[in-house]
C-alpha cells in the first residue's frame, strides 16, 4: 500500500453536554467552525468511546488509548507518567505520585487546588523540597506545567497501594485527605506514613518560601501545599512507533503529554509559546505541524489543553473560544497540506462537561478527513449532529488502528 501521512489534533476534554447558558447546546455546537464543518461533512464522523462505554478516564489513560494501547496492559498509575515527564529516572521499587501545588488554610482546608494556576517560581518551590529525607527514604520533587508536579519516594519496602490526598476536582472547601493504605501490608502502611510526613514538612517549607511571600504581597494565592494522587510504579511499555514502524511527532505545551509521547516512542516538540493553557500560540502549533510533516514525519499529533481547562472551570464561553482557535489550526493545515497524501483528524481523550467540571464517560466527537475517505454527509460538526456517523461506537484504540490502515501501516489478518 502507498504510505500516507496524517495530522491529528487532540482537543483535550473537547466534548460536552447541553449547557443552559447556550440554550441547551454544547460549546462545540455553538462555536463558529466553517472549516471543521467542511472537513467533517466530507469525511467520517462519530462519537467515539475513549476506552470502553461507561468508563471515564483520565488524561493519561485517554491518550494511551488514542495512541493505540490497551491501558490494562501498560498502565500502573499517573504518578510514573508524571515522573517520566519531569525527567526523573525511576528505579525499581520507587513510588511516584502526581501532585498539584495548592493553596490551603491553617487547618488544611483546600482553598484552591491549583494555587491560582501558578506558573512562575514553581521550579524554585520544587527545588526547596527536592531531596528531603524521611526515615530511610528520599523524596524527589520536580515541577511540571503550571501547578503540576511530580513526587517520587525512593527507599526499601514501599508500595503504591495508598490513597490520594487530593479531595478532587471542584472539591475546594474540603480538607486535604490523609493518605491511607489500600491493602493491609507493612509496605503500604509505611508508604502512607512517609508520604504524610513529607507533605507536612513540605507545607512548613512552602509557607515561608520567598516565592510565596512575594505572591502574597502581590495579592496572589500562595502555593503552600502539595496534594497528591495517582500513586504508581514504573512499568516499561512497547513503543507504538516500533509496532507500526512509523515516525511520529508530538507537539504540545503540557509536559505530561510530552512525557506520554516519549513513552510511546514519539519525538516531542514544544516552545515557550506553548503554555498548556488558554494563551497558548495556536498558529505556531499549526505551523510546526506543517514543518514536521514536511520533514518526513508520518503522523503529527497536535495537543490543545484549553478545551479541558474550560470544562473544569465551568466556562462554556472560554470553551467556545478554544474550539474556534482549534478551527484556526485546521484552516491553516487545510490550506497548506498535500491534500492528496495527508489525512486530518480531530479527536479527544475524554469529555469534560462544563456542568460537571470533571471527566465523564460520554463518547467524544471525532472526524477523519481525506481525499479517499467515505463521506457520512453530515452538515455540521457537533455532538448531536454526528451521533449517527460511521465512527460512532468505535473506541479510541480502534480509531487509531483505522488511521494506521488508511495510512498504509497495518498488516492483513489472514491470507
Image: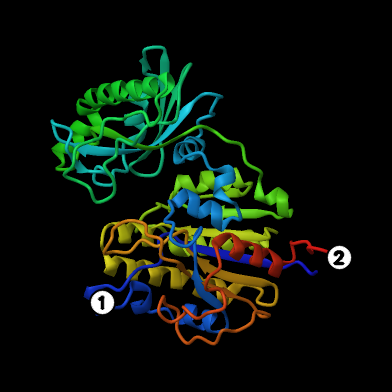
Q: Going by the image, does 56 lie left or right of 88?
A: left
Give the alpha-carbon distance from disc 2 to disc 1, as whole Å: 53 Å
Res. 55 image quadrant: bottom left
Residue beneath the point at 49% across and 60% down: 50
> How would you rate the neighbour count of disc 2 (Cα within 10 Å): few for under 14, some for 14-19, many for 20 or more?
few
Tell me the quadrant of the picture where the N terminus can be found.
bottom right
Residue at the outermost front position: 184
Q: In the displayed structure, would residue 34 be above or below residue 255? A: below
> How would you rate the neighbour count of disc 1 (Cα within 10 Å): few for under 14, some for 14-19, many for 20 or more?
few
Residue beneath the point at 23% across and 35% down: 176
Q: Secondary structure at mark 2?
A: loop
The residue lying toward the viewer, choosing from 277 and 84, is: 84
**Do we see residue 262 in this rendering?**
no
Q: Residue 85: image x %, image y %?
A: 49, 39
Res. 175 image quadrant: top left
Q: Earlier in the sequence, mark 2 or mark 1?
A: 1
Residue beneath the point at 26% across and 42% down: 167
Q: Residue 123: image x %, image y %?
A: 37, 33
Q: Residue 180: image x %, image y %?
A: 32, 29
Q: Residue 197: image x %, image y %?
A: 29, 21
Residue beneath the point at 44% across and 52% down: 59
Q: In the displayed structure, would residue 34 be above or below residue 355? A: below
**Do we see residue 119 in this rendering?**
yes
Disc on res. 415: 2
Q: Mark 1 = which residue? A: 22
Amino acid at each position: 500500500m502507498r504510505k500516507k501521512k496524517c495530522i491529528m489534533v487532540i482537543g483535550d476534554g473537547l466534548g460536552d453536554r447541553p449547557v443552559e447558558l447556550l440554550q441547551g447546546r454544547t460549546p462545540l455546537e455553538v462555536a463558529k467552525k466553517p472549516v471543521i464543518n467542511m472537513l467533517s461533512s466530507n469525511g467520517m464522523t462519530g462519537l467515539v468511546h475513549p476506552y470502553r462505554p461507561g468508563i471515564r478516564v483520565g488524561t493519561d489513560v485517554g491518550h494511551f488509548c488514542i495512541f493505540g494501547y490497551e491501558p490494562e496492559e501498560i498502565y500502573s498509575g499517573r504518578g510514573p507518567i508524571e515522573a517520566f515527564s519531569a525527567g526523573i529516572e525511576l528505579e525499581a521499587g520507587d513510588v511516584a505520585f502526581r501532585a498539584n501545588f495548592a493553596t490551603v488554610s491553617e487547618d488544611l482546608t483546600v482553598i484552591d487546588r491549583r494555587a491560582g494556576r501558578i506558573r512562575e517560581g514553581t521550579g524554585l518551590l520544587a527545588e526547596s523540597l527536592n531531596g528531603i529525607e524521611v526515615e530511610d527514604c528520599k523524596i524527589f520533587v520536580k515541577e511540571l506545567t503550571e501547578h503540576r508536579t511530580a513526587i517520587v519516594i525512593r527507599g526499601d519496602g514501599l508500595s503504591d497501594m495508598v490513597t490520594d490526598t487530593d479531595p478532587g476536582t471542584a472539591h475546594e472547601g474540603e480538607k486535604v485527605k490523609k493518605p491511607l493504605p489500600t491493602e493491609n501490608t507493612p509496605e503500604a502502611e509505611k508508604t502512607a506514613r512517609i508520604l504524610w510526613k513529607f507533605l507536612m514538612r513540605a507545607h512548613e517549607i512552602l509557607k515561608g518560601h520567598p516565592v510565596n511571600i512575594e505572591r502574597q504581597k502581590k495579592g496572589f494565592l500562595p502555593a503552600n501545599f502539595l496534594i497528591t494522587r495517582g500513586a504508581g510504579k514504573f512499568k516499561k511499555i512497547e513503543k507504538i512507533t516500533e509496532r507500526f514502524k512509523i515516525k511520529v511527532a508530538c507537539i504540545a505545551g503540557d509536559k505530561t503529554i510530552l512525557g506520554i509521547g516519549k513513552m510511546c516512542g514519539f519525538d516531542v516538540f514544544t516552545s515557550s509559546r506553548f503554555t498548556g493553557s488558554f494563551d497558548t500560540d495556536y498558529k505556531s502549533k499549526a505551523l510546526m505541524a506543517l514543518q514536521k510533516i514536511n520533514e518526513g514525519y508520518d503522523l503529527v499529533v497536535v495537543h490543545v489543553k484549553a478545551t479541558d481547562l474550560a470544562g473544569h472551570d465551568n466556562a462554556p464561553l472560554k470553551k467556545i473560544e478554544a474550539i474556534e482557535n482549534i478551527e484556526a489550526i485546521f484552516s491553516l493545515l487545510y490550506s497548506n497540506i498535500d491534500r492528496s497524501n495527508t489525512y486530518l483528524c480531530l479527536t479527544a481523550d475524554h469529555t469534560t462537561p462544563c456542568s460537571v467540571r470533571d471527566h465523564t464517560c460520554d463518547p467524544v466527537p471525532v472526524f477523519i478527513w481525506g481525499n479517499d475517505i467515505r463521506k457520512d454527509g453530515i452538515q455540521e460538526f457537533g455532538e448531536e449532529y454526528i451521533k449517527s456517523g460511521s465512527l460512532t461506537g468505535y473506541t479510541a484504540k480502534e480509531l487509531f488502528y483505522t488511521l494506521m490502515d488508511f495510512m498504509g501501516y497495518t498488516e492483513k489478518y489472514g491470507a
